Image: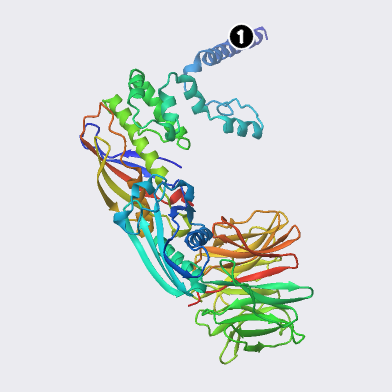
Amino acid sequence: MQKERDENDISFNRMIFISLLIHTVVLSVIFFAPSLPSPRWTFGPVYSVNLVSLSEVLQERKAQSAISREINQTISGEYPSILKKRLDSVPAVPIRRLDSQRKQVSGVDRAIEDIRKKVNTEASPPAPASQMDNAQSNAKMNVYYSIIWSRIRGKWTLPQGILPRENIEAIVQAKILKNGTVADLSFEKHSGNRYFDESAMKAIKKASPFPPFPDSIRDNNIDVGIRFHSMEFR
Amino acid sequence: MVVILSILCLPHSALCKVYIDIDSPAFQKFPIAITDFRKISQQGYQGELSSWFSDTLAKYLEMTGFFNIISKKAFLEDQKQAGLTVESIRFADWSVIGAEYLVKGAFQSNGRDLTSEFHLFDVIKGEVITAKQYTGKIEDKNEMVRKFAGEILSALTGDEGVFGTKIAFVLKKGQDSDIYKINFDGTDFSRVTNFQSLTLSPRWSPDGKFISFTSYRDGNPDLYIKSMNDARVEKIANFDGINLAGSWSRDGRKLLLTLSKDGNEEIYAMDLSSRNLERLTYNFAIDVSPTWSPDNKRIAFVSNRSGSPQIFTMDADGSNVKRLTYDGSYNTSPSWSPRGNRIAYEGLANGRFQIFSSNEDGSSPLQLTFDNIDHESPSWSPDSRYLVFSTRGNGKHRICVMNANGLNVRTLYENVGGCMSPSWSPKIK
């Protein structure tokens, strides 16, 4: 009887020991295991969301887009304001102004200008983006092209009522000499509408001669394609 | 307005080809200068003709909406010195004041005889575009100016315009109404019918020699055709119920009409020589106001089959019906432009009838009028550049003309009693 009780005690103690061992092992596994790959039971990544009313969003957009706000904070000096000006007020030969801008034309400024161009295409004729090394002369040429753009557009006359419904396009090839005179004018592409072509050619003739090239431009002449289209005319 | 400068070459290349995009003209009207005409000799007729010629030509050109007439006060040229030839004109004097085109002329009169010459110059190129001489009587002087205005339009826009066209419309007098006509320039207002009853909806034949209309002269709203050259009138449809005139086919042989003889209003085509009828619509709803497309392959009409009056199109045999208008609860009075690409109609917008136009498939509907009065019954000019319509509001009724884009509205006729349903004539030879 006594022997039987002793056997029971031993078996009970062994069970407690095994139980402790298992618990220790399990707990230590749980404790040290975070580095092990294991399925995670979560509800997915957590985002914090601010609830705002639609009108606030619209107002904010209307006032200024985030990108243009950022740009306006970063930009200082007179360089960007020049290109932002209405072209009608750009002086005929803006060489002096350009000299004062030269120091500020850095890579960053140009990059900003590129972004600004994308944002502000509605408001002003932007300079073309480029990766040119001769940044200053390139910037000057861009201003020069803007002047050409503004002058021709300001002379283009065409009543909407005489055009066909579909969009048409004419490209005039012009060679502009260093002194601003237009040496060659020819159609690179006809629009198919005689009156449209005529008005395009007339606009260039009325707008010329253009101002002489900026000083730093060494080319004796430049070839320009002037593309007229009726797309946004309607 | 977007400007894109695209550079199509490597940066180091010497000859950089740059493209400059120009996508909207600064001006939509041709700047034109018209000098007073030179008097070569004037005997008999005492009126002042030098400035009459220039002012009248300016008036006609202004009506088109395509010209900006430069004020004579801006002229730099010494007009006593300058002649009519290219050599004697200093074109720089004209380009500097903004003129692209210049008109000069001369006249001589002897008794009732009048000879006039007109020269149109291209100021930018410094050359003559066209020149004409007209000989006639003093009474023809308006016609001379009208003809040359047509020459100018033809040279600069490819179409001589609508100076010789007329507009027929309904003039109300008490309970009765009659049909009248007026020239595009507002002259020659005259009566067409004198039925002393309710007379409605005039429509020109394609040659401009006849007008079809509906009149209650004999009690029932019957359909008539009247010759414009003499007093001949013929009743061509007197079915029970309404007999309402629609548009003529391109060859003048068929007439679209609305008849209610079979119960409700349905659209028919009548062969004018045999008087045979072809029924085109079979619907429990009301189908009215048919108008042919310029190629006569389609017909636009008004139907309330979808609940409210809307514009539909169908093939000339009545098949292939498509709904054209979806905006607004009330769209009627379709008019298909003679050049085929737009359909004008009147539609209810904010409680007022306004004129709209859309593509012939119903796309790009465009509201053309916006005043807070009712605008009704649009009808295209034969060159599709203008629309005539009637207005009522503020105690006035008017017949007005505007450019197809809604600009340049001009009143042709105005009264308090009522004028409506204008119809533009074809070009009358």
Point out residue B18 in the picture as x, y percentages from the top left corner.
29, 40
Point out residue B266 in the picture as x, y percentages from the top left corner.
67, 79
Kindly identify the residue that appears in the image at 40 percent across and 23 percent down: A79
State the residue lying farthest toward the front: B43
The residue carrying mark 1 is: A13
Kindly identify the residue that appears in the image at 75 percent across and 65 percent down: B416
Nearer the observer, A39 or A126 = A126
Nearer the observer, B338 or B93 = B93
Kindly identify the residue that appears in the image at 38 percent across and 58 percent down: A195
Point out residue B405 in the picture as x, y percentages from the top left corner.
54, 57
User: In the visual, does A124 lie left or right of A43?
Assistant: left
Nearer the observer, A230 or B147 = B147
User: In the visual, does B127 lie left or right of B36?
Assistant: left
**How would you rate the neighbour count of disc 1 (Cα within 10 Å): few for under 14, some for 14-19, many for 20 or more?**
few
The chain under label 1 reads A
Q: Is residue B322 visible?
A: no
